[in-house]
Image (cartoon, rainbow, N blue to C red):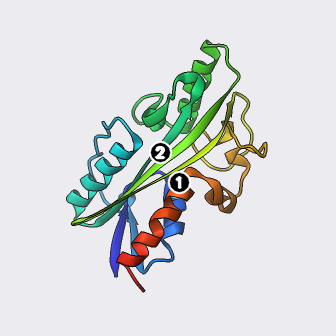
Amino acid sequence: MKKILIATKNVGKLREMTAALSELPVKVLSLTDFENLPDAVENGKTFEDNAKIKAKFFHKLTGLACIADDSGLEVDALNGAPGVNSARYAGYHADDGTNNTVLLNELKKIGVEESPADYRCALCFVDNDVEILTEGKVDGTIKISPRGNGGFGYDPYFYLSNGKTMAELTPTEKDSISHRGEALRKIIPMLRKLFPK
């Protein structure tokens, strides 16, 4: 059975991506299945750049087909920040809590309590001479008052047009409208052609 490495240690991303790949005749691995792998240097200027960097890096390192995403939050009032630095907004090895604290502090500095924002995701699959790239996006509003206990990252502060935050959605509801869900829905049919049952 073909093995596909999902290039993440993020439990939330891993759950979402594993669920999407479950319909394919493949064995899914993640970075947590390997010991002492170095981190990819995500120095791209765009989500697409970083998704490609990660997929190519871990494909070369492990020899496995690899799928990687780079995703994040773009807040209009912060000129698109945190953007590609979303996972590292509070520094390398930051967690959701510290990243959200930095986000709220930046908004308070400019006297903003809410702002249009979007979540964006770029997804890249690499295997030998194959490279596939897809994207997804969801629009919303960042507000300084969090709601909900689900999701991860900035989800409690990301309000959708229906008034709910991403953190108030069930995993199934989130997958159906999220940026990563959209990118996965675009890539799965292409992977199905590569890995027919």
Q: Which residue is mark 1?
A: 180
Q: Residue at x 43, y 76 (%)?
A: 192
Relative side of 67 to 37, left or right:
right
Total marks drawn?
Answer: 2
Question: Do the residues bearing badges 1 and 2 touch, measured as CB atoms within 8 Å?
Answer: yes
Quadrant the C terminus occupies: bottom left
Q: Amino acid at mark 2?
A: Ser
| Image location of residue 2, percent across then percent down | 33, 77
Quadrant the N terminus occupies: bottom left
Q: Which residue, as the protein is rendered here, is positioned at the far bottom? A: 197
Q: Residues within 10 Å of mark 2 (few under 14, many from 20)?
A: many
Q: Is residue 180 above or below residue 5?
A: above
Residue 112 visible, this angle: yes
Q: Secondary structure at mark 1?
A: helix
Q: Which residue is mark 2?
A: 71
| Image location of residue 47, percent across then percent down | 41, 43
Relative side of 99 to 45, left or right:
right
Name the disc covering residue 95, or none: none
Q: Amino acid at mark 1?
A: Arg
Q: Residues within 10 Å of mark 1 (few under 14, many from 20)?
A: many
Q: Residue at x 71, y 43 (%)?
A: 160
| Image location of residue 104, percent across then percent down | 62, 24
Q: Is residue 152 above or below residue 196?
A: above
Q: Secondary structure at mark 2?
A: strand
- Viewer-nearest residue: 83 or 27: 83
Going from the N terminus, do you reach mark 1 or mark 2 first? Answer: 2
Q: Residue at x 49, y 66 (%)?
A: 18
- Viewer-nearest residue: 31 or 179: 179
| Image location of residue 92, percent across then percent down | 39, 33
Q: Residue at x 25, y 60 (%)?
A: 59
- Viewer-nearest residue: 10 or 175: 175
